[in-house]
Amino acid sequence: MIDAAIKALSQMVTPPFRSVLLKSVGLAVALLIVLGIVLDWLLIWLTGEGGQWVETTLGPLAHWPVVTLGWILAFAIGFGLLVGAIFLMPAVTSVIASFFADEIAEHVEREHYPADPPGHALPLARASLEGVKIALLSLIVYVVSLPFLLFAGLGAIIFFLATAYLLGREYFELAAMRFHPVEEAKRLRRIHRGTVFTAGCFIAAFVSIPIVNLATPLFGTAFMVHIHKKVAGGTRRELIEPNR
């Protein structure tokens, strides 16, 4: 597994991967900018038309409370964007990975496994659906985990383990679906759940590094291509002949 991580990291600096990195970073930043614009619009409305409506309804005495509330909201939204950029990054990269997984996997397969039959690219609709499903599941798990962050160490551990499970699951299935039908890929992941979870810990550690985590789709996909290659050989017989 260490060898797979080293191979994935070393290939990230090659020209083909740099091209994909620029596209994936651009998409991730664009998604975060859109989120920021929406929240900024909400703040403007709350401190503008929303504030005027409150003052009109409650009278002049509500002016300073409304202004104070506006400052509090501005700080909360600004802080929320900063924290959100960290905690929502795994969910954001889940969507991004669905667009670039096949392109990244092809580079890895050509470089490290030229003698093996190449995988088949997932239909865009299927890849996007898988990415969105995992992203939504990620958001649910993170929302549930956030209260535990009040307990410092416990919250950080829960968040890390949840991230490892979700990202390990996603990136392994995206790599496996290039060679197996969807249900077979999911079954392969369940058979090797321990290996997949441990591999997910590597990706969770990577995604926890600010700025660097924008390259998570590259590392996660390349890493899981190697993991899938290592586990798929013997398991292929188990999937075909489960009763032997």
Image (cartoon, rainbow, N blue to C red):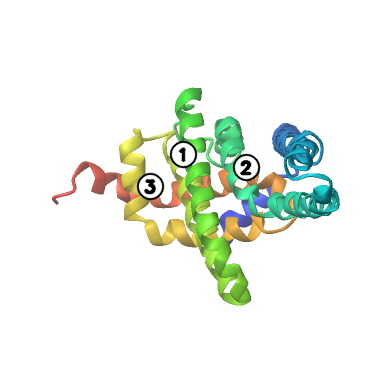
In the image: residue 135, left or right of residue 68 = left
Q: What is the x, y in percent for residue 242?
A: 18, 48
Q: What is the x, y in percent for residue 181?
A: 34, 33
Q: Is residue 197 above or below residue 228?
A: below
Snapshot quadrant of residue 4: bottom right
In the image: residue 151, left or right of residue 28 = left
Q: Mark 2 is on which residue type? A: Val
Q: Which of marks 1 and 2 is nearer the N terminus?
A: 2
Q: Count the marks: how many?
A: 3
Mark 1, residues whose alpha carbon is within 10 Å: few (<14), some, or many (≥20)? Answer: some
The span from disc 3 to disc 2 (Cα, nearest Å) is 28 Å
Q: What is the x, y in percent for residue 11?
A: 68, 45
Q: In this view, does 204 lie above or below 44?
A: below
Residue carrying label 2: 92
The secondary element bearing badge 3 is classed as helix
Residue 198 in view of the camera: yes
Q: Which of marks 1 and 3 is nearer the N terminus?
A: 1
Asked if the residues shown at circle 3 and circle 2 are in contact, with their CB atoms under 8 angstroms apart, the answer is no
Label drawn at residue 232? 3
Of 243 and 46, which appears nearest the observer? 46
Q: Residue at x 55, y 69 (%)?
A: 148
Mark 2, residues whose alpha carbon is within 10 Å: few (<14), some, or many (≥20)? Answer: many
Of 108 and 18, which appears nearest the observer? 18
Residue carrying label 1: 133
Label drawn at residue 33? none
The secondary element bearing badge 1 is classed as helix
The span from disc 1 to disc 3 (Cα, nearest Å) is 24 Å
Residue 18 in view of the camera: no
